[in-house]
Amino acid sequence: MKDIFILAIETSCDETSAAVVKNGREVLSNIISSQIEIHQRFGGVVPEIASRNHTMAIVNVIDQALKQADIVLDDIDAVAVTYGAGLVGALLVGVSAAKALSYMLNKPLIAVNHIRAHIAANYLESDLEPPFLGAVVSGGHTELVDIKDYTHYEILGSTLDDAAGEAFDKVARVLGLGYPGGPKIDKLAKEGKHSIEFFKTAKMISDEYAFSYSGLKTAVVNYIHNAKQRGEEINIPDICASFTYYALEPIVQKAFDAAKKLGYQNIALAGGVAANSYLRQRFEEMGTKHGIKVYIPKLEYCTDNAAMVASMGYYNYINNVGISDLTLNAVPSL
Ligand code: KG4
Ligand code: ZN
């Protein structure tokens, strides 16, 4: 069979990224221009600023992706792009660039769902094939997904309020750790113990595969507030370790319950919070314990990147899914 090269673009939030991937699995390039430093001073992503910076970076990022892959535009088979979910202005920069390329090259334009792309990150440089249980843990989503095949999914359960990554970012802000909070809490948690039972008040909700973070977040805020009022020192590493434990352990337990119930031999972790060292370690431990193979993307493929979009784009392309015309629009709440 002829090799298929996908050029992909990702601009849903604060990373401008372009990648070239061969046959959905082999990453030839994955250029990521992060805006984290730009947004840090505001304590979070400012949508208008994100769009402007995507506009400035996009052409260079695509150029670099082609150069590093040592490929010319004519050798690309299709152009894939994230069209949702995400910030509308940010998404539109990528969608417009992809449309222009598709029109100029007369090659198919493939619309990719950002969350599905996060799951597809597990196909990069790996042998994973559906069916499997997907655990998506990102800044915007927390869900368990039954991945029936490359393009058919069923959501088993999701968060009833905040997403896990969002909770990490909010707790970090309350602790004065800055944006993005996930990696900072991760680092500090390693120096602490999950000893703060008070956070258990926001215990696991009973609903089989659902999650909730607003109660836990409030418990952390109240704990800090009460300690301050009593003039007590707070132990930030212990807060980070305890929050991490109560935030992520339900995901570990419920993901393995779901995989066992479905009779699946494989579990794949996806999304920005899949970069968390506690979560990665617990999935590995549970995989060994239950004889289930665990797939976790390399760190570079956990947070937003275009290689994962190219992989999902490839499977859409060969299955004739998501092939779009030039009327493609951004869908922020996809
Ligand atoms: O998947 P992603 O890039 O964005 C969405 O598509 O939503 O995930 C970003 C989220 C942020 O909330 C960030 O704090 C979190 O992933 N994150 C982490 C870690 N690295 C990134 N959370 C916990 N531990 C980490 N090491
Ligand atoms: Zn993402």
Image (tube, grey):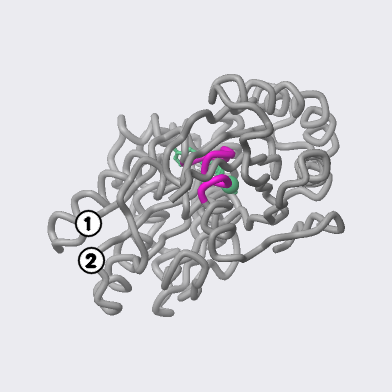
Residue 275 appearing in the image? yes
| Left or right of residue 210: residue 286 | left
Graded by Cα atoms within 10 Å as few (under 14), some (14 to 19) or many (20 or more), the crowding at tag 2 reads: some
Relative depth, front residue between 2 and 115: 2
- For the point 42% across and 74% down, the residue is 209
- For the point 14% across and 54% down, the residue is 288
Q: Secondary structure at mark 1?
A: strand
Q: Which residue does the numbered mark 1 point to in the structure image?
A: 293
Quarter occupied by the C terminus = bottom right
> Which residue is situated farthest in the front direction here?
1
Q: Amino acid at mark 1?
A: Lys
Q: Horizontal and vertical percent for residue 170?
A: 59, 45
Q: Horizontal and vertical percent for residue 294?
A: 26, 53
Compared with 303, 160 (above or below) is below
CB under 8 Å between discs 1 and 2: yes
Residue 228 appearing in the image? no
| Nearest to N terminus: mark 1 or mark 2 | 2
- For the point 54% across and 38% down, the residue is 172
Q: Horizontal and vertical percent for residue 329?
A: 83, 56
Q: Secondary structure at mark 2?
A: loop
Query: Disc 1, ligand 1: is the CB inside 8 Å?
Result: no
Graded by Cα atoms within 10 Å as few (under 14), some (14 to 19) or many (20 or more), the crowding at tag 1 reads: some
Relative depth, front residue between 205 and 90: 90
What is the span of residues highlighted in magenta in the rendered image?
302-311
| Left or right of residue 246: residue 107 | right
Compared with 59, 157 (above or below) is below
Q: Which residue does the numbered mark 2 point to in the structure image?
A: 265
Q: Horizontal and vertical percent for residue 69?
A: 54, 25
Residue 309 among magenta residues: yes
Compared with 155, 287 (above or below) is above
